[in-house]
Image: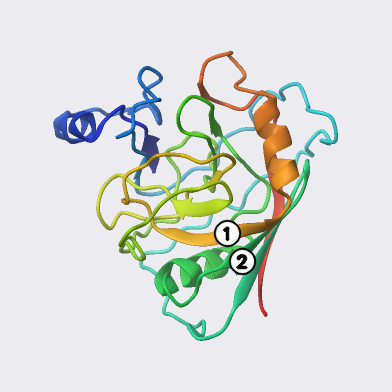
Amino acid sequence: MHIDFPPSQSDLDHSARRDRRSRRLPVRSGLAAAGAAIALLAGGTTAVAAPLPLHTQAPGCMTPGDAQPNGKQWPAEPAVTIDPNAGYTATLETNCGTITVALDSARATHTVNSFAFLAGEQYFDHTRCHRLTTEGIFVLQCGDPTGTGTGGPGYRFGDENLAGATYPAGTVAMANSGPNTNGSQFFLVYSDSKLPPNYTPFGRITGGMDVLQNIAAGGVKDGSGDGAPATDIVLDSVATARR
């Protein structure tokens, strides 16, 4: 599974036609363009990557442990078991603090169901948030057990909740490589971002924005506007609960 940030929708369409075996998650030039987009490309069997070198930790962040993701795979989207009329929350315990999210099970039923399923399988546990963007689009991307931007759960599912979608600070949404290609990778918006309504919003941060913004303040490891965060951030655990 893989993510791409073309600078415009036309560039996204062009890049989709190109045969690229190893697509970069973001295109680092032109990120401030209003038409910029995120793309997540789901692959086949996912191998868990070796730990990446630890980066400089931001104040308040602990050095991650050595535990590795389980890298489980499934052949198809899980059956819906959540109640779309009920409220659900997600708690992301990171090495930099706790982030809580109110999940929109009514308007993004399949997305929330998949997220809850993966959380229940400890799929997200010990995964690194592998990407930070800081120019025009302001997101932290997580959910890939390989930490490379190419990982996923082995299945894809359809888009939801796109009509009139916007991406203000606090939005939690799915990354994708085109229509109906959602997997496990998602992004947390730490400052208002202009994106086309192509990425399923399925939650809103209700606690821990200071944690997310502290991570973002550290910038990108290589000093660019798009790449691995300078702060090495790991999801120690992710859990969902019915409110």
Amino acid type for the residue under numbered disc 2: Ala
Where does the image place residue 130, in percent across and percent down from the top left?
56, 34
Quick check: 113 above or below 224? below
Structural distance between the alpha carbons of marks 1 and 2: 5 Å
Taking depth in this image into account, of 203 and 97 the one nearest to the observer is 203
Quick check: 204 above or below 213? below
Q: Residues within 10 Å of mark 1 (few under 14, many from 20)?
A: many
Where does the image place residue 11, in percent across and percent down from the top left?
21, 28
Tag 2 secondary structure = strand
Q: Quadrant of the N terminus?
A: top left
Q: Residue at x 49, y 33 (%)?
A: 148
Q: Residues within 10 Å of mark 2 (few under 14, many from 20)?
A: many
* Left or right of residue 66: residue 10: left
Taking depth in this image into account, of 234 and 166 the one nearest to the observer is 166
Q: Residue at x 52, y 35 (%)?
A: 138
Q: How many numbered callouts? A: 2
**Residue picked out by circle 1:** 204
Q: Can you tell which mark lies on residue 102?
A: 2
Q: Is residue 67 visible?
A: no
Q: Residue at x 39, y 37 (%)?
A: 3
